Amino acid sequence: MWSKIIGVLIAIMGIIYIFFIPSDPVSTKIIFKLIPMLLIILFASLQSGGESKKYKILILIGLTVCMFADGLIYWFIVGLITFLIGHIWYIFAFRNIKQTSIPKWAIALLLIYGLSMVIWLAGTLWSQGDTVLALAVIIYIAVILTMGWNAFQTANKFVIIGAILFIFSDSTLAINKFIVDIPFSDALIMISYYGAQFMFALSIHYSATRKNLLK
């Protein structure tokens, strides 16, 4: 029952932050941005991890790191590094419940995505003379690809959906910041981001059972 109530609160607070909280003052914006993540962490802590208690702990650490990154992203490089650390914790978590090899179609999609982003995003930054940021972006792309790769190996549909949403959120953020303005980018970024974190939290309950695995 409490999980359902918290799930509703996550949606409500997410909507309030995305659509109703103004950009200024920044301190208020950050506070309301963190509330949905705090609720997602609470939701995750209430999930039964079954036999995969280590997975639950790793996911909780990843969620907490990402919550800090939410606030630090206003200092972009610091936030980027913190999110990268969050992805690494998720990689550890997904490896802990690995079930199968990654499907060939998923390999193709991830590699096409990674190559396209390196050429388009990192290539643009490199051509502008921002070599350090271009290298940082390449490293980040490699890490999120690894996160996605390991997500597919769990065969857990909640993990896979979460990983795809996270990659979409990160990609939209990067393209909007460095390449071209994307209409409704803030909403797209945060809806997919909160959705990703909620899916990871929800995956804890199903980490020890095969009935919800991707077929």
Image: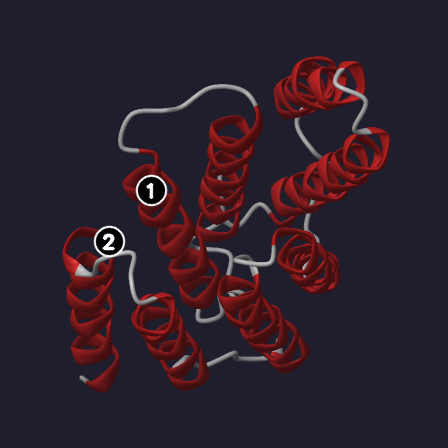
Residue 10, image x and y in percent?
25, 69
Where residue 46 appears, as percent x and y from the top left, is 39, 85
Q: Amino acid at mark 2?
A: Ile
Rendered image: mark on residue 201:
none
Marks 2 and 1, the one that precedes in the sequence: 2
Query: Which residue is at a point 22% across and 58% down the rendered structure image?
Result: 22
Q: Are marks 2 and 1 in contact (CB under 8 Å)?
A: yes
Rendered image quadrant of residue 194? bottom left
Q: In the displayed structure, does residue 87 sit left or right of residue 187? A: right
User: x, y (%) of residue 158?
Assistant: 44, 51
Q: Is residue 85 toward the left or the right of residue 52 in the image?
A: right
Residue at the disc numbered 1 = 186
Q: x and y percent of residue 29 in the render?
A: 32, 66
Q: Classify residue 36 by image quadrant.
A: bottom left
The answer, for residue 215, to whether it is visible in the render is: no
Q: Which residue is mark 2?
A: 18
